[in-house]
Image (tube, grey):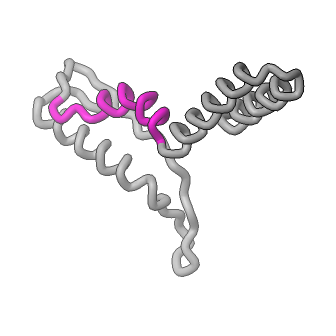
Amino acid sequence: MATLLLTFLLIITIFLFICRHIKTGNAFLIGTFLLFIMTGTGIILSCCLQDLESFSMQKNPVWKKRNAIVLLGAGTVKSNDTLSPRPTLLAYSRIYETARLYFLCKKTNAQCN
């Protein structure tokens, strides 16, 4: 998505230079370059994900009488030595967090599913 936006802005910049709108073209060129740098370094991504990450990092959530803990998958892979599938490397942090939340919920004598 970011590549499409940057390409579109670059096309507009080239069009402005062709039409001899030099000042506007320079402004678009600088803006496109800054957007490229901010996208590549992850500044925009970290700003967009800040609220989502802070929500998931609650150390002691408030539990109700009935709770549902959902584990979102990250895929499985099959080993050559075993026939059963196993989680991918990126799934282990999700499994750990789900287990941690489940045991915290069980400590409060609440119903946890």
Q: Dividing the image into 4 quarters, which one contains the N terminus? A: top right
- At 45% from the left and 28% from the top, the residue drawn is 48
Q: Verify whether residue 107 appears in magenta.
A: no
**87 sits left or right of 61 in the view:** right
Q: Quadrant of residue 58?
A: top left
Compared with 18, 43 (above or below) is: below
Q: Dividing the image into 4 quarters, which one contains the C terminus? A: top left
- At 45% from the left and 37% from the top, the residue drawn is 43
- At 71% from the left and 19% from the top, the residue drawn is 24
Compared with 70, 95 (above or below) is: below
Going by the picture, which residue comes out furthest to the left? 108
Q: Where does residue 112 sit, x and y in percent of width and height?
A: 26, 31
Q: Is residue 113 visible?
A: no
Compared with 2, 25 (above or below) is: above
Q: Verify whether residue 46 appears in magenta.
A: yes
Q: Nearer the viewer, residue 99 or 23?
A: 23
Going by the picture, which residue comes out furthest to the bottom? 81
Q: Nearer the viewer, residue 75 or 31?
A: 31
**55 sits left or right of 9 in the view:** left
- At 60% from the left and 39% from the top, the residue drawn is 36
Q: Where does residue 26 sit, x and y in percent of width and height?
A: 69, 28
Q: Where does residue 85 sit, x and y in percent of width and height?
A: 53, 63
Q: Which residues are magenta?
A: 42-60
Q: Is residue 81 visible?
A: yes
Q: How many numbered marks, from 0 up?
A: 0
Main SS of the magenta part reads helix
